[in-house]
Image (cartoon, grey):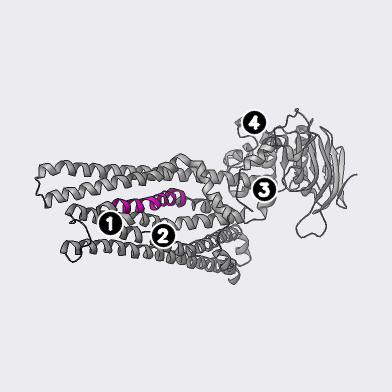
């Protein structure tokens, strides 16, 4: 249990440090993705504030005419209707501003998620294997969602809080200098003290989001291994660990809420102080206990000051209500930057450096020279200055004991692992291939195929999404999928669970192989495609593979001498080199 709880702990002093300036700049740069709706969202409270001044002056004028001048109701009707129209107009403007802010936030979140997906694909599966899937999912969903309040609420409120209080106080100066000065002096104190409280809120938010991300990964890993935990009698112990981790998250959530309430208390104290000061001053002036004016204070002027005094602090109240959104957004940006080894910039710029490659149909030429690859936990490289070449249309088997580097070599050729050396396909360096062309030219079927939740046919159709039902059926036949699918109640429409739950290893391998028969690659890379098959099925599947690979280049990694004997050329990995047998 202590191990589960400690996994959520980290250095509190580190979380109190300000985020790097580039993170703040990156967050603000996202506004370019929704510039127009953000401008509307920021302008709405300013326009509404201007109408508020007119509304308050008209209301004070109507009350003054009704109380002091004893004007008949017919004369007041026009002013009352104008006030009602202004209130309705301000409500519409506020609604439009909120809609624009929500629209801007959705655009930006979609933009960030797409950028993170591109970065995830750019880094490849070797990078993602080293991260907890729960943390990656939390970053793509929860951390990005934390940006919502910053753009939808905080930025519009910040524009209103920066301009409206000062503007309202300046408007009051010609009406009453003292009231205007009281508001003008007290209003800036609120952001000052809020900033002091906000430093603690930002640190608490970073601690909270980090704990939440770790809890997501912690819970996802336990859920994935639930069957294993139950088999070894660890279910209750791990349930206690989840409870401890959840309690740690609860404590951090409460610390964030305490700071948020403290920030609101600071605001309300100074706002109440300012409004009370103006009210006391006007009351004492009317009672004759205070006389600092050059002219008598009319009822209209006094009511106007009293009506506007709370409105001076209203934008600041709104700003304070969403000030925590800024801290949460910066904490989310820090978490994303930490998890993804930096913030996603314009990933398309890197993609543009890889231009489309023109290649002829048929087999692809493969050349590998000086390939060196290391593996985690191994003092010696898996491959060192390895070299091999395959002519267009050539077939070769790649042999060697388990762990020797066959899968590593195949994944490096497919640009799924980082490597040092030269790999060329069709005489074009691997780094210069754009992703779409490379995936169209090269087909890789690994030892552990990725199957998704959906039907068997849906998983086969991943090889070519536009494939017809007849094409999927033919691919399933060639991969011997129909041999087991035909005995299922729904056939190829049988639904599978996540990661192909419901199929054996050999059946999942055949579903993945069926995808190959829907494609038209020039280079086929297969990693133990018949490892989980019986001899008869292995022979039929291998016959279909070789038939399909005719005219295409094939590199097939295998342990089986019988499989290797079916190919005209055999390569073996030994002493970190690739050698012909």
Label 1 – label 4 distance at C-alpha: 83 Å
- Magenta region, mostly helix, strand or loop? helix
* Secondary structure category for the residue under label 3: helix
Q: Which mark is residue 74?
A: none
Q: Which residue is mark 3?
A: 123
Looking at the image, the residue that sits furthest to the right is 581
Nearer to us of marks 1 and 3 is: 1
The magenta segment is 150-172
Residue pictured at 83% horizontal, 52% vertical: 401
Nearer to us of marks 1 and 4 is: 1
Q: Which residue is mark 1?
A: 177
Q: In the image, is residue 255 above or below residue 505?
A: below
Location of the N terminus (image quadrant): bottom right
Looking at the image, the residue that sits furthest to the top is 360
Quick one: label 1 or label 3, which is nearer the N terminus?
A: 3
Label 4 – label 3 distance at C-alpha: 33 Å
Q: Quadrant of residue 291?
A: bottom left
Q: Are marks 1 and 4 in contact (CB under 8 Å)?
A: no
Q: Quadrant of residue 346?
A: top right
* Secondary structure category for the residue under label 1: helix
Quick one: label 4 or label 2, which is nearer the N terminus?
A: 2
Q: Which residue is mark 4?
A: 471
Q: In the image, is residue 168 above or below residue 415?
A: below
Label 2 – label 3 distance at C-alpha: 42 Å
Q: Residues within 10 Å of mark 4 (few under 14, many from 20)?
A: some
Residue pictured at 32% horizontal, 47% vertical: 49
Quick one: label 1 or label 2, which is nearer the N terminus?
A: 1
Q: Which residue is mark 2?
A: 191
């Amino acid at each position: 249990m202590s191990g589960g709880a400690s996994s959520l702990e980290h250095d509190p002093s580190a979380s109190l440090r300000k985020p790097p300036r580039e993170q703040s700049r990156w967050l603000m740069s996202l506004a370019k993705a929704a510039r127009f709706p953000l401008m509307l969202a920021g302008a709405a409270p300013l326009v509404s504030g201007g109408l508020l001044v007119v509304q308050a002056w008209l209301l004070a004028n109507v009350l003054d005419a009704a109380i002091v001048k004893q004007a008949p109701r017919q004369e007041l009707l026009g002013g009352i209707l104008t006030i009602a129209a202004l209130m309705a107009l301000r409500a519409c403007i506020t609604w439009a501003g909120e809609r624009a802010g929500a629209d801007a936030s959705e655009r930006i979140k979609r933009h960030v998620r797409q950028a993170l997906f591109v970065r995830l694909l750019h880094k490849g599966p070797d990078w993602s294997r080293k991260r907890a899937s729960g943390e990656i999912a939390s970053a793509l969903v929860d951390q990005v969602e934390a940006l919502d309040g910053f753009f939808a609420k905080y930025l519009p409120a910040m524009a209103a809080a920066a301009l409206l209080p000062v503007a309202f106080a300046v408007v009051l100066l010609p009406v009453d200098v003292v009231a205007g000065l009281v508001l003008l002096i007290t209003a800036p104190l609120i952001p000052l003290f809020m900033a002091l409280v906000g430093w603690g809120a930002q640190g608490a938010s970073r601690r909270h989001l980090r704990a939440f991300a770790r809890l997501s990964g912690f819970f996802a890993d336990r859920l994935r291994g639930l069957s294993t935990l139950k088999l070894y009698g660890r279910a209750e112990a791990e349930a206690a660990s989840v409870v401890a981790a959840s309690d740690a998250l609860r404590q951090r959530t409460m610390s964030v809420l305490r700071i948020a309430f403290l920030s609101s208390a600071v605001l309300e104290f100074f706002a109440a102080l300012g409004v009370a000061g103006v009210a006391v001053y006007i009351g004492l002036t009317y009672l004759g206990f205070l006389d600092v004016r050059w002219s008598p204070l009319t009822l209209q002027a006094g009511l106007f000051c009293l009506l506007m005094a709370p409105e001076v602090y209203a934008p600041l109240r709104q700003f304070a209500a969403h000030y925590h959104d800024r801290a949460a957004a910066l904490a989310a940006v820090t978490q994303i930057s930490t998890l993804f080894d930096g913030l996603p910039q314009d990933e398309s710029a890197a993609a543009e450096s890889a231009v489309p490659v023109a290649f002829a149909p048929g087999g692809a030429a493969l050349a590998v020279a000086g390939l060196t690859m290391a593996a985690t936990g191994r003092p010696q490289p898996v491959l060192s200055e390895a070299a091999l070449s395959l002519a267009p249309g050539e077939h070769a088997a790649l042999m060697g004991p388990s762990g020797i580097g066959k899968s590593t070599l195949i994944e490096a050729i497919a640009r799924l692992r980082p490597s040092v050396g030269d790999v060329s396909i069709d005489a074009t360096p691997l780094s210069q291939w754009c992703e779409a062309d490379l995936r169209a030219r090269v087909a890789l079927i690994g030892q552990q195929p990725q199957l998704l939740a959906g039907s068997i046919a849906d998983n086969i159709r991943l090889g070519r999404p536009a494939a017809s039902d007849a094409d999927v059926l033919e691919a399933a036949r060639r991969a011997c999928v129909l041999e087991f699918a035909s005995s299922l109640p729904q056939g190829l429409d049988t639904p599978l669970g996540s990661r192909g739950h419901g199929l054996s290893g050999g059946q999942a391998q055949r579903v993945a192989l069926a995808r190959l028969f829907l494609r038209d690659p020039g280079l086929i890379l297969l990693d133990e495609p018949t490892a989980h098959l019986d001899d008869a099925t292995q022979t039929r599947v291998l016959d279909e593979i070789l038939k399909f690979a005719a005219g295409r280049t094939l590199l097939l990694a295998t342990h089986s001498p019988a499989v290797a004997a079916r190919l005209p050329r055999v390569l073996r990995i030994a002493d970190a080199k690739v050698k012909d047998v």
